[in-house]
Image: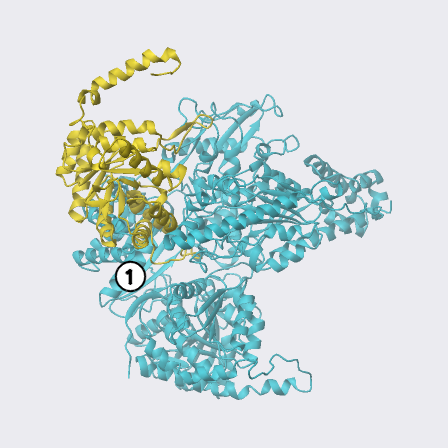
Amino acid sequence: MTTAGQFHTLDGNEAVASVAHRLSEVIAIYPITPSSNMGEWADEWSAKGRTNIWGAVPSVVEMQSEGGAAGAVHGALQAGALTTTFTASQGLLLMIPNMYKIAGELTPFAMHVSARTLATSSLSIFGDHSDVMAVRQTGFAMLCSESVQAAQDLAAVAHAATLRSRVPFLHFFDGFRTSHEVAKIQELPDGVLKAMVPDDLVAQVRARALTPDRPVVRGTASNPDTFFQSREACTPFYDALPGIVQAEMDRLAGLTGRAYHLVDYVGHPEADRVIILMGSGGTAAEEYVEWANAQGQKLGLLKVRLYRPFPAEALLAALPKTAKAVAVLDRTKEPGAYDPLYLDVVAALRDGGREGLAVVAGRYGLSSKEFNPACLKAVYDNLALDAPKQRFTVGIVDDVSHTSLVMDPDFDIEPADVTRALFYGLGADGTVGANKNSIKIIAEETDNYGQGYFVYDSKKSGAVTISHLRFGPRPIRSSYLIRKANFVACHQPGFLEKYDMLEAAAEGATFLLNTPHAADKVWETLPVEVQAHLVAKKLRFYVIDAVAVAKATGMGGRINTIMQTCFFAISGVLPKDEAIAQIKKSIEKTYGRKGEALVKKNWEAVDATLAHLHEVKVPDAATSALHRPPTVPAEAPDFVQRVTAVMMEGKGDLLPVSAFPPDGTWPSGTTKWEKRAIALDIPVWDEALCIQCNKCAAVCPHAAIRAKVYDPAGLAGAPGTFKAVDYKGAEFKGSKYTIQVAPEDCTGCNLCVMVCPAKDKSNPRHKAIDMAPMATLRDAEKANYAFFLGLPEADREAVKLDLKGSQFLEPLFEYSGACSGCGETPYVKLLTQLFGDRLYIANATGCSSIYGGNLPTTPYTVNAEGRGPAWANSLFEDNAEFGLGMRLAVDQHGQHARELLAGLADKVGTDLADAIFRADQSSEAGIRAQRARVAALRESLARVDAPEARSLALLSDYLVQKSVWIVGGDGWAYDIGYGGLDHVLASGRNVNILVLDTEVYSNTGGQASKATPIGASAKFAMAGKVQPKKDLGMIAMANHDVYVAKVALGAKDAQTVKAFLEAESFPGPSLILAYSHCIAHGYDMALGGEQQKLAVDSGYWPLFRFDPRRIATGELPMVLDSGAPKSALAAFMRNETRFRMVEQQDPARFKALLASAEQHLKARYAAYEQTSKMTLPAPPPPEPAPASADGK
Amino acid sequence: MDLTTTYLGLKLPHPLMAGASPLSDDLDAVRRLEDCGASAIVLRSLFEEQITRELEGTVHHMDIHAGAHAEALSYFPDPGDFRLGPQAYLEHLEKVKAAVGIPVIASLNGITPGGWLDYARLIQAVGADALELNVYYLPTDPDEDGASVEARTLEALRVVRGEVRIPVAVKLSPFFSSPIHFARQLVDAGADGLVLFNRFLQPDLDLENLEVVPRLHLSTSAELLLRVRWLALIHGRVRADLAVSGGVHTPIDALKAVMAGASAVQVVSALLQRGPEHLETLRRGMEEWLDLHEYESLRQALGSLSHARTPNPQALARANYMRILQGWLETEPMNGERS
């Protein structure tokens, strides 16, 4: 009996989560890309009351880490619940200890992994098998899926087979390529799942559950006498497992008609050349093999589905006897060894007596590297050689170890009846959403199959998205990017300058451009390179001013519906009228439950579109004088020219191995070459009105508006439009002052305008900073900015260290890819201004590591002396420890240097040595003087002929004070890294911890953390969080020897600067909790500063500083820097979508949560107030200082 | 004393009702209003902006960053069903209807003919006894003439009228150039009642920060007189019930409104200041005054001082203005002591 499921379009994560949710009772998860969405789906379904196949709503719990999730899973399994989890990459690594336990205890359990690269020399969120290969010896069965359809189907097989075999299952599929690919699949109805997981299997789980009603113990400790034997006792379960899995696959085939085998063979029955691989590469390979065999070749393909236990017999049985050469392709790298699948296959072939075969190992697809027909051709061609290349790589050019196979970059086999469309959109214009919707329309409303895959930018502001859509009459197996499109759309005209998007246009394809220029005027606005493609490839060219249509129909900046309508109108993929009817239907489906008005407005936009869509007659020749500008200017350093610029153009795939540092060490200061020019409007300074407070510079998230005070002589040669006024302060009397915008680095967020306090008295709408269109200002301001950068920096010793003064210090963190209006980056920038030339940053994984270190460019930069922040990211969970390690090394070096200096004092001069030992480095002047002494020391050491002198020369820089800051988000500090943070706070060591608190996991898309406040809706707290935010500040204060501050730059900037300075000067651990507005709060970020004020005024975010040094002086250690709540909490909350959506879901619940939040804030304020009056007994006077290393 | 009155076809024991305000925002307060004797309750307005912009705002802020970054395909959970402004309003209306026995008048506030007016039908479906259409509009476009403003208001009313069978009152602002003519057009377009007048919340100026700031001022009895005049001028000249809104604080205020022609007296500021119990004070005060002056019923007093019936109708017109001005000038030197 087959039970036909309905066809639906969805991505791999949703398909898998749907099965797992319906077959589970407890789901414990932790967000990690690319598996986060599986947990989110499960949570959303449970929140909406969706039940599993037994009629119960599964419990979904978000834990503090994957380690925590694995522990909760283990406990739930022991207590007899059908349990699942979803994870990937480092998350999977954190589960390993429990995986051994769960497998060792023969516990039925299925987990789902969207396989992702493990961080090595660099982190990557994309797909390969390095994570799953790291758990292959845990005892888990491992089942691999190659496509969205298979991922859904084999998820069910995993849940069924684990119950029958008692062996836990890890079911995996390729991160992004499968987890995020949208495809049309036939869904598994509940009936199939019930047939796969009958009640008697569930009863067995219940019977084994740990219960005091039938008590047993598990988790004992064994000794040498018995452990080995008991470990071998599980072997029969593994022996039986392949048979059980095949039986479940057969059961599924009987129910659905879709057949799977432990190892599936595709290709010629008498194939001479065979590839063996796992995962999404299998579908591309299958497509290639069929094509090549149709050309008369004899190729075969073995797709390994069950990887552990390794199905050697099935593999031998499936491999044609005619095979002469086999390539085993691994999607992981085991440096210095054969990769794992190869070893398994070779062992199986040897055991099976097939030693005569030529077997070669190949590596492909790391971090979602393309694996397309060109790669496959290269692999099969290699196998045809008399001596095939062994241990090769494919898909890259390895000009270092020369492992790579040569590929024909133009080789393509895509069938003519598949429509291939490419869309270049801006992150915020809704292109991806509209394209997902188009796939749904085409795939669900017609007999066509559809596939959507989306390529995203590494930037969070002004980000480009590239949608790859295929439609065709057969299921689409092309698991690779489109290289020859018959439809290309450019949703942002600015991209024409940056990307060679028509390179991928096929002959005779259609090009759709959103442009403000009319059809008869647009030609001359195109760069000649674009014109050349249009002419040479005989492209049909359409234009629409989608922005104007959006504005006219009240759609604001969202052009997605309009561009979608254009696509349907000219692509011919559906009859035009039918397409428009379908778009309208889908709009109604999307917005219908949210309001008719919104539906009507979108419909109006659809109706208005066609009248504004025009075909452009393409002339016979490319004539434009406009050229695509070079990606980086000629003065950029060689590395930036050769490597960074290529990556910036989106052509990093072309770079050979030799281009890259082998250890992940990259130059800093490269964002400055990436002039993205993404702002529509940029700030304009009115020097006459300005009161010179520098607040605009302080709040700028991108260091794109700066202040300088300088000698008037510096103005010589200034561009004509360069503005300068007399400086008003006393400290730089007689100097000139300039506020300057970096026009091509500004993101147009408006924060500087909002914070500007200087209003024109007769026209208060005009401020000392106003926004004006960039187009007319760009060239002049570009020149002005270049001149500004050439002006000397202020003397750091003369700058008064308050908010205003801090902005005269050079920012060594600039033009990051953070969101426009980011609330975190101003703190990071301030940190680099205050201490950047002596700063170590240990950065937890998260937003700050992504805008801090996501290639191609890095925002951390150096000053004129070449000094700047030394930045590194280890992991998400270990950042406090990572930073402490840096401190230990620096202290160790410093101590050793002092010891060496003590020994060499006579030789380098006792006065100098003495001065170095006794240096006061608590000020800029002190540090500068010490640097001069160390320089003198090095000179002296050069004249000393002793090995100790050489050692000291190497370590001498550590005689100058270094500042160690540990930076991360609330997900790290409150959740996954809390244990380490707690330990470091208790270490007594001189480290500073900056928590950029957005109160939610921002980087992974808004999951609740323990920093999420009462009443906020977040993923895993959709209906509004009930538990209060953890009071990390109070917890830290309980140590009594930790400096703690809570700051909000937008509310009280002077207090923020003070806290940073105090934390730095405090000789022990310091913790700063920094309120950071975030797009995950759901409001216009231009209002971030205003919201911060409301947060403080309403008591939502009280400000304080707790300085243990004040205990010794008999002062009150805690200073409350904000008063009792004076404005309504509700007013603050209702401005933000995260709170408002709770009210909009359930007003009564919101009211109750608001009351609870108010109560909590009152209690917290009372606690703070009492603490601020708390005196602590002064510690005994310090022991006489231990003898210094020089013995004096 | 018989204080009964009829407003929008609703037979009420007396004319005193709670006007559109936060007083009706929660069920306990609504029950308290009923316990304190309100003859009806006008719910706070469902604003056009709530239906359009709030929804768009929420959807906008949820969607704007979605699908832009590989690690975060969205930043908010999708609750699917939002009970945005309109839904929450309808649910509240339904609960209020279930909680009290007195008539409940819903209120829609907006001006542009559009999808939001469809909510009139839903308001009826949920059980509102009548609907107040509040045409709160600031004409800020120099190209828009007064006739266009009136035409749009009439169009909005016609749309609503086309949607519902329940009685519809229009709440007016005092800034129409020919209010009586316009009142007649509204009634011709289907208005069953007119509410005089909307109190615009006038923003204030913050001189320190050079900003315009919202400010809520509660009404005083002084504001009543504008209403009294126009009630008196309109009463008897249109076939619609009139209600007063704004400035009723004392029993005498209420009686003035009734005598000028109001069948219903909406009270807000006085209740916000003194609590719902003040309704009883007002009712008792009216009763006592009418007893003392030997009225048989309130009906007897209704419209007795309207333009059509007052012995000195010119006093309601321009002459009145002249006399007050002159009188004020005369009395000013006497330190405000007036006879």
Q: Nearer the viewer, residue B322 or A842?
A: B322
Q: Which residue is mark 1?
A: A439
Q: Residue furthest left?
A: B188
For disc 1, the chain is: A
Q: Position of residue A427 (x, y in %)?
A: 38, 50
Report the number of numbered marks: 1
Residue A663 against residue B307 in the figure, above or below = below
Based on the displayed image, in which of its 4 quarters is residue B171 positioned? top left
Three-letter amino acid code at the position of disc 1: Ile
Instruction: Indicate the colour of chain B.
Output: yellow
Q: Is A771 on the left-hand or right-hand side of A28?
A: left
Q: Position of residue B260 (x, y in %)?
A: 22, 30
Decide: few, some or many residues near mark 1? Use Cα within 10 Å; few <14, some 14-19, many ≥20.
many
User: Would you say residue B144 is visible in this rendering?
Assistant: no
Element under disc 1: helix
Q: Please identify the quadrant where the N terminus of chain B is shown.
A: top left
Based on the displayed image, in which of its 4 quarters is residue A943 positioned? top right
Q: Position of residue A1024 (x, y in %)?
A: 44, 56
Q: Residue at x 38, y 52 (%)?
A: A1147
Q: How is the image coloured?
A: by chain
Instruction: Indicate the colour of chain A.
Output: cyan
